[in-house]
Image: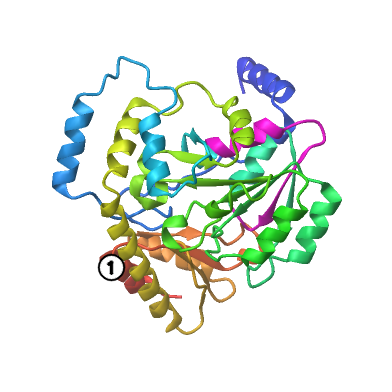
């Protein structure tokens, strides 16, 4: 190692927070040349006529100008298509990740804690760590339902400033009992955020309950419905909360091309509704096919993916065998004790799902 390299390492060790140095960066697998069933994306493209209409709008974009700071057209489209109640304002983020960060920044402070269940979306823990907040995870039951007794006990013990609950949950795909979530909201001393990233694939939501509880917010994204490349999320709830969280939003965080594309897309919601219906049907078909395979345990899902538990010691081998056959899924083994021997497969097109099943050798 050169003297300069040693000097750099010394400076990094001195000034980078130990909590950050202990983390691993979020990894995204290289999917080039593979059937991509690892990231819960909508597998369908737009009809060609719709694509041409969209491109005509993009050609007129004034990319030399800053975007509208509040993206009113996007907010109007989201309010309309997601049935956001009147009187519940929105704040937009560059994907759900930025919103999670904004929410945590708003309530962060010495000794304040973030609580969630595990396994769940890893960014809850990571962003709490980024901000120097203590994170407390509460393990689900072996069937991935809420351990409501332990969860309520931890809320009482830790008095968290912020609770995140994914509904449906990722990576398990299940919905928690709504009565249990209401008990959490009522017991929480601080803010409860229901993360409904997979709302297009289920028929239940906490959006209608906004305003009924002083500490309830709902977060959504357009990524799973078919617009993952836009990186657009929304948070909604009582104005008193949203107005404070808005203060943490960086200026112009929703760029010109995203605003044009999102507003256009939301005016053609029926296209995405048809795609979502096809994904739901394919999910149910795929689950039924997996249930016919001996030696594995597929879990029923309300999202656009299915979690599958294999025989002990098989997950790594099957993951690599699938990749060798040109199919990329998500290997969950080793990420949490409850996910031992598990793979998560995104629901693709019927052709992609057939290719997965043909390569799947559990």
Q: Is residue 48 left or right of residue 123?
A: left
Residue displayed at 52% across by 64% down: 173
- Tell me: residue 322, above or below residue 295: above
Residue 108 location, x and y as percent?
72, 32
Q: Is residue 115 magenta?
A: yes
Residue 325 seen in this snapshot: no
- Tell me: residue 322, above or below residue 20: below
Residue displayed at 66% across by 31% down: 105
Q: Name the residue under label 1.
A: 350
Residue 247 location, x and y as percent?
59, 24
From this viewpoint, which residue is outermost toward the front? Answer: 86
- Tell me: residue 140, above or below residue 247: below
Residue 40 location, x and y as percent?
42, 55
Residue displayed at 42% across by 84% down: 292
Viewer-proximal residue, 315 or 343?
343
Q: In this view, does 249 lie to the left or right of 81?
A: right
Residue 44 location, x and y as percent?
27, 54
Badge 1 element = helix
Residue 222 seen in this snapshot: yes
Count the numbered circles shown.
Answer: 1
- Tell me: residue 61, above or below residue 96: above
Viewer-proximal residue, 267 or 129?
267
Q: In this view, does 102 lie to the left or right of 39?
A: right
The segment highlighted magenta reads 98-120
In terms of image quadrants, where is residue 240? top right
Q: Is residue 163 left or right of residue 197?
A: right
User: From the image, which quarter does the N terminus lie in?
Assistant: top right
- In the rendered view, how is the structure colored? rainbow
Q: Is residue 96 magenta?
A: no
From this viewpoint, which residue is outermost toward the right? Answer: 157
| Label 1 crowd bin: few (<14), some (14–19), many (20+), radius 10 Å | some
């Amino acid at each position: 190692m050169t003297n300069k390299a040693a000097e750099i390492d010394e400076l990094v060790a001195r000034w980078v927070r130990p909590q950050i140095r202990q983390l691993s960066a979020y990894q995204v697998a290289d999917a080039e040349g593979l059937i991509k069933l690892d990231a819960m994306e909508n597998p369908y493209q737009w009809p060609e006529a719709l694509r041409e209409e969209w491109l005509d709008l993009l050609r007129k974009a004034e990319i030399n100008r800053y975007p509208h700071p509040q993206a009113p057209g996007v907010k109007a489209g989201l309010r309309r298509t997601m049935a956001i109640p009147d009187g519940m304002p929105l704040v937009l983020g560059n994907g759900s990740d930025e919103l999670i960060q904004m929410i945590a920044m708003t309530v962060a402070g010495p000794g304040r804690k973030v609580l969630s269940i595990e396994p769940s979306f890893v960014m809850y823990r990571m962003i709490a760590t980024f901000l120097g907040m203590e994170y407390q995870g509460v393990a689900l039951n072996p069937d991935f339902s809420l351990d409501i007794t332990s969860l309520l006990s931890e809320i009482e013990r830790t008095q968290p400033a912020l609770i995140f609950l994914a509904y449906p949950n990722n990576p398990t795909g299940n919905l928690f009992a709504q009565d249990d979530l209401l008990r959490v909201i009522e017991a929480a001393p601080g803010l409860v955020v229901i993360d409904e990233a997979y709302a297009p694939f289920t028929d239940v939501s906490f959006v209608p309950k906004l305003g009924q509880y002083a500490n309830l917010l709902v977060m959504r994204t357009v990524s799973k419905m078919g617009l993952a490349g836009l990186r657009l999320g929304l948070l909604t709830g009582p104005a008193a909360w949203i107005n404070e969280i808005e203060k943490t939003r960086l200026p112009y965080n929703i760029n010109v091309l995203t605003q044009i594309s999102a507003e256009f897309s939301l005016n053609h919601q029926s296209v995405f509704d048809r795609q979502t219906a096809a994904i739901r049907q394919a999910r149910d078909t795929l689950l039924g096919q997996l249930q016919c395979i001996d030696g594995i345990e597929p879990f029923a899902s309300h999202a656009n993916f299915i979690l599958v538990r294999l025989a002990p010691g098989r997950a790594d081998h099957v993951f690599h065998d699938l990749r060798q056959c040109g199919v990329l899924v998500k290997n969950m083994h080793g990420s949490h004790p409850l996910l031992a021997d598990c793979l998560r497969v995104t629901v693709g097109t019927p052709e992609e799902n057939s290719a997965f099943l043909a390569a799947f050798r559990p």
